[in-house]
Image (cartoon, grey):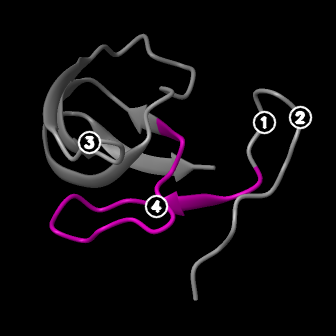
Amino acid sequence: MALAPTPFALGSFGNAVSITPGTTVLRPPPTALWIGGSGTLSVVMAGNGSTVTLSVGASTTAPLPLCVSQVLSISGTATGIVGLW
């Protein structure tokens, strides 16, 4: 059963899921990602299905506003990925 988005205050999230990189399609797609550590992250964007590789710095403390359907891989110490919506 897919969870429907729930309206919350701007900048807050009502749902979270731990994400393990791989082939799992995220439904519903999270509207933000929180990533612990630094490194590179390969994701599939939910809107157009394009694959993007992102560099994430260790100083990232806020969720990244990315709507992704998959997290394909990570490298470095970019671990503890949490999808938020």
Which is nearer the eye, 22 or 80?
Answer: 22
Q: Residues within 10 Å of mark 2 (few under 14, many from 20)?
A: few
**Is residue 14 toward the left or the right of residue 43 in the image?**
right
In the rendered structure, which segment of residues is drawn in magenta? 14-33
Looking at the picture, which amino acid does disc 4 mark?
Ser
- N-terminal of the two: label 4 or label 3? 4
Q: Are marks 1 and 3 in contact (CB under 8 Å)?
A: no
Residue type highlighted by circle 2: Ala
State the separation of the CA atoms marked 2 and 4: 22 Å
Mark closer to the observer (1, 4)? 1
Residue beneath disc 4: 18
The quadrant the N terminus occupies is: bottom right
Which mark is first along the chain, 3 or 2? 2
Mark on residue 48?
Answer: 3
Looking at marks 1 and 3 on the same chain, the residue that comes earlier in the sequence is marked by: 1
Amino acid type assigned to the residue bearing label 3 in the image: Asn
Question: Which residue position holds label 2?
Answer: 9
The spot of residue 71 in percent (x, y) is 24, 51
**Disc 1 marks which residue?**
12
**Is the Cβ of the residue at disc 1 closer than 8 Å to that at disc 2?**
yes
On the picture, is 4 further left or further right than 74?
right
